[in-house]
Image (cartoon, rainbow, N blue to C red):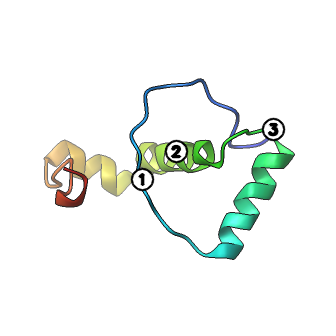
Amino acid sequence: MPLIKPHKKVQNETLKLSCPGDLLREVQKYCTAFHIERPEEFFVQAAQYVLEHDKDWTRSKKNRLIDPLPEILK
C-alpha cells in the first residue's frame, strides 16, 4: 500500500521550491505508479506526515518555542 495517495482538493497557497533533479524524477515515478495526478500532493502529504510524527516538533509546539510562521512565509 503506498504511503502517499491521491488527496481531495483544498485551498492551497503557492510556494516555489527547488530540489535535486534525481529526487524530483523519483517523486514523479512514484506519483505515476500510484495515480497521483499532481506531484505537489506528494510533497504536501510528506510534510504533513513529518509534522504529525516528529516528536521534537510536537514538543516544541506544546512549549511554544517555535514561531509558527517563519519570517520567510509571512
Among the two numbered marks 1 and 2 on one chain, the one whose residue lies closer to the N terminus? 2
Q: Position of residue 40 (x, y in %)?
A: 58, 46
Element carrying mark 2: helix
CA separation in Å, label 1 and label 2: 15 Å
Foreground residue, 33 or 38? 38
Element carrying mark 3: loop
Picture layout, residue 6 above or below residue 23: above
Foreground residue, 19 or 55? 19
What residue does disc 1 label?
A: 54
Q: Residues within 10 Å of mark 3 (few under 14, many from 20)?
A: few
**Residue 16: which quarter of the image?**
bottom left
The amino acid type, in three-letter code, at marker 2 is Val
Left or right: where 7 falls relative to 53: right
CA separation in Å, label 3 and label 1: 27 Å
Picture layout, residue 43 above or below residue 25: above
Q: Position of residue 64 (x, y in %)?
A: 13, 47
Left or right: where 52 falls relative to 74: right
What residue does disc 2 label?
A: 44
Element carrying mark 1: loop
Foreground residue, 71 or 50? 71
Q: Nearer the viewer, mark 3 or mark 1?
A: 3
Left or right: where 59 falls relative to 37: left
Q: Position of residue 20 (x, y in %)?
A: 60, 75
What residue does disc 3 label?
A: 35
Among the two numbered marks 3 and 1 on one chain, the one whose residue lies closer to the N terminus? 3
CA separation in Å, label 3 and label 2: 16 Å
